Amino acid sequence: MLTTRRVLFSLIATGSVLYGSAGEVLHAQAATNTPPPWDITRPRGTPRIISFTTDEGTWLSPDVSPDGRTIAFDMVGDIWVVPIAGGEARALTRASGIALNFHAAWSPDGSRIAFVSDRDGQENVWIMNADGSNARRVSTQREKRVSLPAWTPDGSYVIARTGGDSNNDGRGELWMWHVDGGTGVRITGETISASWPEVSPDGRYVYHEEIVAIPGDRNPARGLYQLRRLDRQSGKVAEITSGVGPLQDGGGGRRSSGGAVAPALSPDGRWLAFARRIPDGTQQIMGHEYGPRTALWLRDLQSGAERMLMDPITTDVQERNNNGTVPRYSWMPDGRSIVLTEGGKLRRLDVASGGVTTIPFTARVEKPISERVFAPTRITDGPLDVRMMRYHTASPDGRTLAFVAVGRIWLMDLPGGTPRRLTPTEFAADEYAPAWSPDGSSLAFASWSDATHGHVWRIARTGGAPQRLTQLAGMYTNPTWSPDGQRVVVARGAGEMLRGRMPSDESAFSLEWVPAAGGEATNIIDVSSRGGRIVAPKFGPEGRVFYLESGAGGGAGGGGGGAQSLRSVRVDGFDPRVHILLDAADEAAPSPDGKWLAFARGDNIYLAPLPWPGMQGEPVRLAVSQPVLPVRRLTLEGGNFPGWVSANVLQWGSATRFFRHRVDVRTTDTTRIALQVPRPMARGVVALTGAKLVTMNGDSIIPRGDVVVRDGRIVGVGASGRVPIPAGAHRVDVSGKTIIPGMIDAHKHTAREGRDLLSQQSWEMASNLAFGITTRSSPRERRKSSSRWPRRSRRGSRWVRACSAQARRSRAGRRRASRMSTRSRTRSTRWPGSRAMARARSRSTSSVGGTNDRKQWKRRARPA
């Protein structure tokens, strides 16, 4: 396993924003513990200057001045200007240091340039004089990024797109700001996903692109984006494009996607240029064929006729649009040509003939960057310190803790015993979700094996051979005992894992009970599940089975939209009831007396009264951000698997910690778990002989060489015959092959199986290794996915987990931020709302083995 104290990346001078980049460790003033003012433009550590001269760039986004003499464009984080005929470009924003500056837009009189900059800590619209002087901020967004500014014809307002946090899917809103100040006005509705504003010459209309697909269907070939026109006087929105591209006769393929992006009006307002994807189109780039490709089109707004202007242009990024679906482009003032970027160059496109000429430029880049913060990463061979335990549950007598780690069930005497494996070593399937019998004499648990699939088992508290309770193999999870100990209720999936998919792909679960002695399963009720949630049944008052079901809406005391409804049913399947609606809950457990409800949300535990139905018999809808009932957040540093020891004692777990909370006196006892297991290591000596070796010594290549590996480590590399090969080594002749150093993927999201059961062999892990990736760094994963174990049977790359996922999705504008966090309206990211919360999240990440210190969590937080 790889370990590292910190994974930090400095800002490299590119034309884009690095997701999740972290910077210098915060300097606290010793006396006041108050950080000094943070200057985002100043490089940190020992800075250096990146210097080079270039005649090309990526995603240049040119804009032509109103007099047609000058082009403004952005490159490597600065705004540049160059004469229309070409020549030496000059940087206008060099004084902003390491800040990012992009999307330049000339004012109607040519005296000023609007642009986007993060020099105040967030991407906002700024305005500067045409010579780069007197830069000042116009928009005041804190939670949302701003992009694509456009002027109104009178030069009094700037319209831009807002939205685009680190997990944005292209959705946004159009806002308008007066150049002299104010907080701005939203001009498109919250439910409209608008971007790329283009104002008509008379100022009445705002053309823009809009996402029209249903949520989850981000297929540009189905007309994902369309062009719309907002009438600023009436507020009405008209369709400019619509539909999907038809198939050509004879099955020749799609002529176009049917969608459209990036509108640009001619100066007289008659012609509308836009980009459109050609799904079947390909293009040659550096000897390689890529597809699809994007073309520039022209619409006559008087007749409605369309024609293609240029094919190809820079390929669009409709699947994930944060800063424009294509690079910005600009009409010349006479309306006869368009200036755009293609192939890294500035091009001038003649509208009538389609002829393209290149506008040559050179630019001397002088970009400061912060010192790279680096900590060595070591590969260790010793025992594995297990950091992620799951399914924590104490025995009814409170003397023994059961939990799952590295795919096995462990028992530990409370409060400070040494964990011991419960199941015998010959039990090969992975083990999940232990549940104590009411008398504490045995446990039920679920298993999964890629070969034999899953079952529910029973095992004595003292160990021994498990007894299989179920007859039909399937995907089982979360067994729970009936109060009389005669039945075990379990959730069974519809078979997605048996078809090679994941439990989070299940759309429904069957709640079933089996006799405690084993036998045929009996269906209780079928439960729908969305969003990857795994159904976890719990017994509650009156011996009823409680569970969460997805897709509820409405409710007393809350808004509409989707929620999880806490429901219950008798074991015979009759008398179903709905008790409460919860927003974004993953698991819920009612107290045995029915007075309290504990639930897990966002990897933390909450406690609330379990109410009677609200007005007109409707269940109460409980939102943490706007609770209609008192909600107590019991954890800041993580918590899952809520359950009740008694009517007054709640239990849950978080990684290496187990908690028991007394509801009456509001005290919590914490038990820490320490577990070491042997690290699976390859043993023996393997010699790979006769291959071409690509070394890490510059461009040195060994035409025919040998590689010797001992106990999982490379001990020899060199020309054949010059590397000692120990006697008894297993020789593999790889003549005619090429061996390269293992690649490190520094940003790899791996948790495709992030909830509950995991396949024993992940095809994703194996395929990464097959393509030469030997180490992966995962900057953002769910906590529950951390239980993966580098078992000998699992083939794949080493996995470095840097931090927990901090983003939580919510419906746009439904809820305000809670006091503990702040977030944007669209697919919001929950930023820590206090320094205490920032520190808690860092500790939570560290507790499960994370290594990333996210500076922005602390800097965005309000003082505690």
Image (cartoon, grey):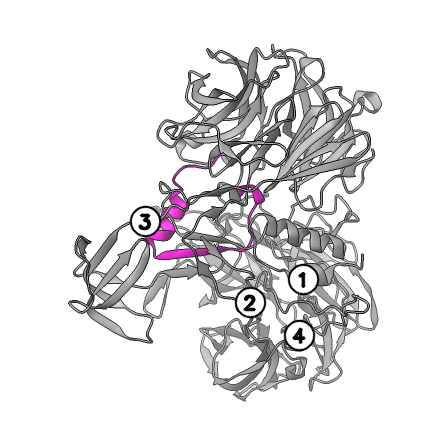
The reply to whether dot 2 and dot 4 touch (C-beta < 8 Å) is: no
Q: Is residue 671 left or right of residue 469?
A: right
Q: Position of residue 579 (x, y in %)?
A: 74, 23
Which circle marks residue 856 in the picture? 1
Residue 532 visible (yes or no)? no
Q: Secondary structure at mark 1?
A: helix
Give me the C-alpha separation between circle 2 and circle 1: 13 Å
Question: Is 765 contained in the magenta span?
Answer: yes
Tell me the amino acid under the disc marked 2. Answer: Phe
Q: Which residue is mark 4?
A: 105
Q: Is residue 776 left or right of residue 178?
A: left
Give me the C-alpha separation between circle 2 and circle 4: 31 Å
Q: Earlier in the sequence, mark 2 or mark 4?
A: 2
Tell me the amino acid under the disc marked 4. Answer: Ala
The reply to whether dot 1 and dot 4 touch (C-beta < 8 Å) is: no
Give me the C-alpha separation between circle 3 and circle 1: 40 Å
Tell me the amino acid under the disc marked 3. Answer: Ala
Number of marks in picture: 4
Q: How many neighbours does mark 3 have within 10 angstroms: few (below 14), some (14-19), or many (20 or more)?
A: few
Q: Which residue is mark 2?
A: 9
Q: Give the foreground label among 2 and 4.
A: 2
Residue 374 visible (yes or no)? yes
Q: Earlier in the sequence, mark 2 or mark 1?
A: 2
Question: Is 342 contained in the magenta span?
Answer: no
Q: Position of residue 351 (x, y in %)?
A: 51, 73
Q: Earlier in the sequence, mark 3 or mark 1?
A: 3
Q: Give the foreground label among 3 and 1.
A: 3
Which circle marks residue 753 in the picture? none
Give me the C-alpha separation between circle 1 and circle 4: 29 Å
